Image (spheres, grey):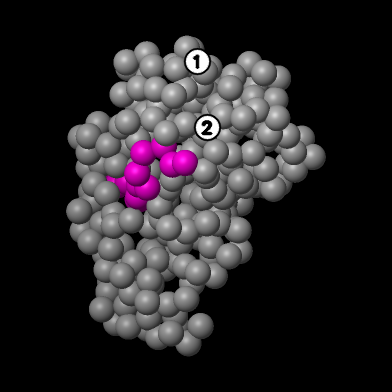
């Protein structure tokens, strides 16, 4: 805690003109990275990290919760400063600047416990119905969809698609569902009675990828905002807060 207080003092001296500046960032539910409570409070590993890092840089962050499609529209036209948090992609590079990584994600397949499903290459799942939520997955998975490797693909697009996908698994409407491992495990822990019949296949689908704050290229001063955030992030990572936050939300780190 003393280290964190010292960091705040140091950055307040370095950035005297920005102390107490309010900043609104868009986000969307994706627990445990971003948890949106019924009363509107936003917590979660990435939400907490970004809030603390920006506090070091002299900003007070408020989160505005949007469906992902609406948040993307706002980023494209500069209607919001940034979004917490996303993976990088060539498409997003066209309208966003990206911070240094604030977290990392790993996709795996989830299945019913009573099913024996083992895979080494995605072609091993050619007889399977595979579910996904329309996210920016690893390229190897997107390529497999494009090549029609799987028997069928089930897509669920919703504000909180994971519970819907897990229910489809339990109902036998799909064989496996690709999901970020911490997200899937969060739902298994927090809805343990409903989803007790589901487990994961530990083999990763593609490489571990990084999560970033995406800043709209059309936001005034966006590049300087990214630079200030990155400097504060480097300082923040010297504290114990990342480990404490991951522990609070029961997250596996890479």
* Magenta range: 203-216
Number of other residues with Cα within 10 Å of mark 1, as a class: few under 14, some 14 to 19, many 20 or more: few
Please say whether residue 13 is one of the residues in the magenta stretch.
Answer: no
In the rendered structure, the answer to whether residue 180 lies left or right of residue 167 reads left
Q: Residue at x 52, y 23 (%)?
A: 131
The residue indicated by pointer 2 is 118
Q: Residue at x 49, y 26 (%)?
A: 132
- How far apart in space, not on screen, are marks 1 and 2 (Cα)? 12 Å
- Element carrying mark 1: loop
Q: Residue 91 at what x, y percent from top left? A: 25, 31
Q: Residue at x 22, y 38 (%)?
A: 93
In the rendered structure, the answer to whether residue 54 lies left or right of residue 202 reads left
In this rendering, the answer to whether 172 lies above or below 218 is above
Which dot marks residue 127? Answer: 1
Q: Residue at x 27, y 37 (%)?
A: 89
Q: Nearer the viewer, residue 147 or 69?
A: 147
């Amino acid at each position: 805690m003393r280290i964190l207080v010292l960091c705040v003092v140091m950055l307040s001296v370095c950035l005297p003109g920005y102390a107490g500046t309010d900043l609104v960032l868009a986000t969307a539910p994706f627990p445990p990275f971003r948890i949106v409570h019924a009363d509107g409070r936003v917590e979660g590993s990435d939400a907490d990290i970004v809030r603390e890092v920006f506090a070091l840089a002299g900003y007070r962050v408020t989160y505005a919760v949007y469906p992902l499609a609406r948040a993307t529209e706002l980023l494209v036209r500069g209607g919001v400063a940034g979004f917490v948090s996303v993976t990088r992609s060539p498409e997003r590079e066209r309208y966003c600047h990206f911070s240094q990584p604030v977290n990392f994600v790993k996709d795996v397949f989830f299945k019913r416990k009573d099913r024996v499903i083992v895979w080494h290459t995605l072609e091993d799942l050619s007889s399977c119905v595979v579910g996904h939520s329309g996210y920016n997955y690893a390229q190897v998975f997107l390529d497999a969809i494009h090549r029609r490797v799987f028997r069928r693909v089930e897509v669920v697009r919703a504000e909180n698609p994971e519970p819907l996908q897990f229910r489809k698994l339990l109902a036998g409407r799909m064989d496996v569902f690709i999901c970020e491992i911490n997200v899937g495990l969060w739902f298994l822990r927090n809805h343990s009675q409903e989803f007790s019949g589901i487990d994961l296949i530990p083999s990763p689908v593609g490489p571990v990828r990084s999560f970033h704050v995406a800043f709209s290229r059309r936001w005034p001063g966006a590049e300087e905002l990214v630079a200030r955030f990155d400097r504060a992030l480097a300082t923040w990572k010297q504290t114990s807060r990342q480990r404490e936050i991951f522990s609070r939300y029961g997250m596996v780190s890479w």
